[in-house]
Each structure stands twice: as structure tokens, then as C-alpha cells.
Amino acid sequence: KLQNMKTDDEGMAFWNDIKIALEKQITELPISLSDQNVRFNQEIYSTTQDFDRNTKKVEALKAITFDDFVEFYDTFLRSEKRRQISVQVYGKDDVITDDIDANSEKLVDDVITYRNSLTDRYGEDE
């Protein structure tokens, strides 16, 4: 469906409307002095201290083309290589059954070890 939007005038108009709405959201001015204080404090306490962050976000948004979006979607959201995780949390009184399908499910007792195995399998996160 995304590929059809690229050739359709209505689809490209929708894409441009999305970009305009995102730009408005990014450039929205703080409603109160308290909101502005929160924004400044976030930058002060962050490691980057980039007070021009919103301007850079808008420039990056303007540089994104529909083809870039479709490529991202196909690579990271629709691809067979995408990472997925489904979590079920059991309480201490819950009974965990042993009928786990080894091909599709894995019981993780040690989260740190499992996380490290993902890093080994997929490479370092960027």
C-alpha cells in the first residue's frame, strides 16, 4: 500500500500533511513558563546540552523523503530480520508450565545473559 501512495497524488499529499503536522508539533512553543523551564532543564542536565535541538529536528524532518520512509519501513518494521519481543510476567504464586515450544518461545530466567546473547547475535546497537 505504501508503494501505491508514492505514485498517487492523494498519497503524497497525505505524506506532506504528516510532515507538516510533525513540524508543528516539534516547533510548538511552551504553553507556560513552567513548560519552558522543563525544556531548558532537560537540556542542562542532558549530556548534549543542545538548546537548538528542535530546529535540528525540523531540518532532519524536512530532509526525509517518502522513499526514505518506505525504505525504513521495509527494513525495520516489515522485514523478517526485525527484532520482536513478547513478554509475559508471572507472579511468584503463578505456576509456569513446561509446555514451552522451543521453536517459538523461550523462558528467560536471566535477563542480562539473554540481552548479551542478542547483542552477540545481532551486533551492537547503534
Image (spheres, helix red, strand yellow):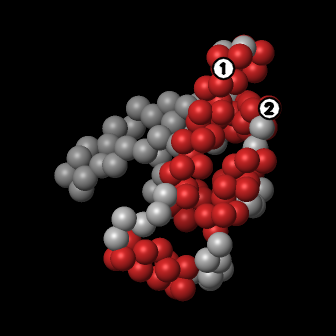
Side (left or right) of 101 relative to 35: right
Where does the N terminus fall, quadrant-wise? top right
Image vertical order of residue 77 relative to residue 60, above or below: above
Tell me the tag on residue 67: 2
- C-alpha span from label 2 to label 1: 13 Å
In terms of image quadrants, where is residue 60? bottom right
Residue visible at 72% across and 14% down in the picture? 8
The answer to which of 91 and 74 lies nearer the viewer is 74
| Depicted 4 relative to depicted 67: above or below | above
Identify the residue position indicated by label 1 in the image. Answer: 11
Q: Residue drawn 65% across and 77% down?
A: 50
Sequence order check: which comes first, mark 2 or mark 1?
A: 1
Question: In which quadrant of the rendered image does the C terminus lie?
Answer: bottom right
Q: Nearer the viewer, mark 2 or mark 1?
A: 1
In percent of width and height, residue 66 lies at 75, 32
Q: Are there few (<14), some (14-19), or many (20+) residues within 10 Å of tag 2?
A: few
**Viewer-proximal residue, 100 or 115?**
115
Report x, y in % for residue 76: 70, 38
Q: Report if residue 3 is visible in the image.
A: no
Q: Residues within 10 Å of mark 1 (few under 14, many from 20)?
A: some
Tell me which amino acid carries mark 2: Asp
Q: Position of residue 69 (x, y in %)?
A: 72, 36
